[in-house]
Amino acid sequence: MKEDIMTLQPGEIEHLQREAAARAARRRRTQKALLIGLNLIFAFFLLLPLLYALSVAFMPSSELFTTELNLLPKHPTLDNFRMAFQNIPILRFILNSFLMAGIITIGQIITCSIAAFSFSFLDFKGKQLIFMLVLATMMVPGEATILSNYLTVSALGWLDTYQVLIVPYLTSAMGIFLFRQFYSSFPIALYESAKIDGCSNFRFIFTILIPLTKSAIGAMAVYTFINAWNMYMWPLLVTGSNEMRTVQIGISMLNSVDSQSVTMMIAGVVMIIIPSISIFIFGQKQLIRGMFSGAVKG
């Protein structure tokens, strides 16, 4: 084989190299096409319940409750969405959820970044112990503290108000841990140089740290907003009027005794999951980048 190669002319060698490169390129394109095809198949099966719910939302009740298997509406209609708006103040519920989730997201970004700064750059007695206690709270389920929290906010007279939905969730151990791991990748000399220049701690946080941690902030924002938007147990316990209910509580009001309301309820569900899905789709890269950006130093 080596002797045959040695007898080839330079033009023939270049031709063989081009053919080998072309075969390798075709092989890579084939593998990529197969992977894309498999991903599309898996994505279709994973999204099938959501796609069917979207189909049912535009389907008249007469087409759903039939012996035929109707995957797509034969006569699409917007009546289900119209009836959902007529039966419950869904716009009010969406406004409440946006307000609650937005303020909780901003509040956690501020409080968690300040706490993480203290654990990363400041030296004080018992710092490691306090940080371990903060992490230990992540192992306590929310159901274990919901009764004591309810008694506290009830004694303060906060029931059925915005503050009862927002204040208990203005910080989180998960956010403190995420920011602290990200700040650990910064050299301590950065903080010491800022202090020599007369920079205060709060100025260092908001003018230096936060601009350098956009990926962590993006991950925290997506994670916190989706969790707050999907919150169910706490708003159900502390709210009792339509003015304060969130979408997760209000949408259950569409589930009436009449079985014909299923399509209307699905239409309402489709409307309330669109914001959370949209935020996740547009922020998934930022979420993944923020979760792993502080994992590797160097």
Image: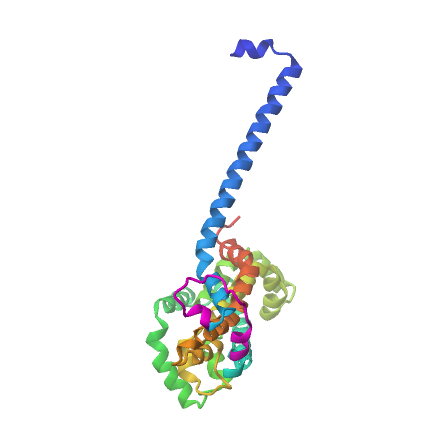
Tell me if 169 is positioned left or right of 106 in this view: left
Residue 34, position as x, y percentages in the image: 49, 41
Magenta stretch, residue numbers: 62-83
Residue 217, position as x, y percentages in the image: 55, 63
The colour mode here is: rainbow
Q: Is residue 202 visible?
A: yes
Tell me if 91 is positioned left or right of 233 in this view: right
Q: Is residue 190 above or below residue 66?
A: above
Q: Residue furthest left?
A: 144
Q: Is residue 256 above or below residue 291?
A: below
Tell me if 256 is positioned left or right of 109 in this view: left
Secondary structure mostly seen in magenta is loop
Residue 181, position as x, y percentages in the image: 48, 58
Q: Residue at x 44, y 56 (%)?
A: 46
Q: Residue at x 45, y 79 (%)?
A: 254
Q: Nearest the camera: 116 or 237?
A: 237
Q: Is residue 39 magenta?
A: no
Residue 11, position as x, y percentages in the image: 66, 16
